[in-house]
Amino acid sequence: MRHWPLLLPLLTIAATAQTNTSARRAAGTVTGHVYCADTNTPARMASVQLERLEDVEDRGADRPYHYSGPPSGGVVQTAFDGGFTFSSVPPGSYYVVVSAPGYLSPRANGDEFDNAAPQPPAGQQPIVIPKVNVQADQTANIDVRLERGAAISGTVRFDDGGPASGVHVMVLHRRKDKWVLSNFTSVIVGGNMDTTDDLGRYRVSGLRDRDYLVMLQLSRTDLESRGARDAGLSGVERSMLRIYSGDTPHIGDAVPVKLGAGEEHSGADITIPLSKFHSISGVVTAAGDGHPINSGHLSIEDPRDKEAVVDAELGSDGTFHLEGVPEGTYTLYVRSPRDQQFQEVSVGNRQTITNEKTLHLYSDLEQTLKVEGDIPSLVLTVTEKSRQRAARSQ
């Protein structure tokens, strides 16, 4: 007598094993080394990632970098001999994107890819990212050489001579008649975003040869408790001030720094002119009953280029305090004003989290503001959106 029922599970197991074997075989390996072109030595602990060509090309020339999830195979760091390995890589064509402090990388500078338009200005080399083709059950080998980039360094001080330590330093370059961030931080380990040291010194490296603006961000952030049991602290940005090379808070008045290929440009010092600045304090209230609005964003923008000079978040009591506003006429904005309620929710093991619930939404506010000195008690009023709709319907 034949035992057919036993044969079916055996066939199923064999088919499953064959499927798993095929799945394992449908992948390849990428290995290689990264070298520093200026020293001919291994690029140790550099970051390497693979990106499918079709994923990158679909982003278009106007979006040279757009985060679309973790890169294929993750991000690996090179060994002391500069070597790296990606295993179990699905077949296809990939960019091999490498990043190391001080060296040129398209991710660190927000540059276009070699197949993107428009092309770099005359005299500049295009950004060429190495490519590798991966086949099933095959090992693809590729070596990458990194070119050292240019660097900007200097010291930041207040106009009373004190060093400005802990200040965020960024650089911007022109793209389509607009200044955009150059030291762009992506999923690759590292990046050029820097802060000044205890003496106010900074250095931004790994830059291409072109014109740059140095931008400082001075942020004052408080930590507030917004839970009934003080379950946690929430950061509230009280004031954010930007200063550009040329010692000015206006990007339109900034002085560019021109860098040559691999140039070390020192002495790009910046003085923060605190003595010429004013402060603006006040509260944002609801038009209906005058209660303070406990959430929203406030900014003062230069009407010439619509760039923010100073901005801040509203405190839980509706108050704000903007620092570093020079004399002039500005456009003041209150954006996304709303009443929020903060509730504690128990999640077990005696742990709680704070949930935010929006109770009322208000319309944005825009008004002209002339600054000739400190403004200590500015009251801004916003209208609830539902009330606006009711008024229009009458």
Image: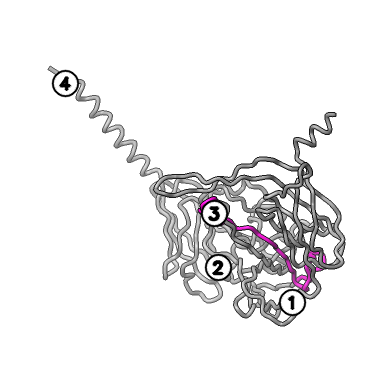
For the C terminus, which image quadrant? top right
| Residue matched to label 1 | 271
Residue 325 found in image quarter? bottom right
Residue identifier under label 3: 95
The answer for how far apart the CA atoms under marks 3 and 1 are is 42 Å
> Mark 1 or mark 4, which is nearer the start of the sequence?
4
Q: Is residue 167 left or right of residue 53?
A: right
Judged by depth in the image, the label closer to the viewer, 4 or 1, is 1
Label 2 and label 3: CA atoms lie apart by: 15 Å
Farthest bottom residue?
161
Q: Position of residue 226 (x, y in %)?
A: 58, 52
Foreground: disc 3 or disc 1: 1
Q: Position of residue 331 (x, y in %)?
A: 83, 55
N-terminal of the pair, mark 2 or mark 3, is 3
Mark 2 vs 4: CB contact within 8 A:
no
Q: Which residues are magenta?
A: 228-256
Q: Position of residue 28 (x, y in %)?
A: 41, 49
- Label 4 sits on residue: 3
Q: Which mark is residue 146?
A: 2
**Mark 4 or mark 3, which is nearer to you?**
4
**Which residue lies most toward the top here?**
1
**Residue at the spot 80% in from the left edge and 32% down from the top edge:** 390
Q: Earlier in the sequence, mark 2 or mark 1?
A: 2
- Above or below, 11 relative to 205: above
Which of 57/290 is in front?
A: 290
Q: Secondary structure at mark 2?
A: strand
Q: Is residue 382 left or right of residue 15?
A: right
Q: Amino acid at mark 2?
A: Leu
Secondary structure category for the residue under label 3: strand
Q: Amino acid at mark 4?
A: His
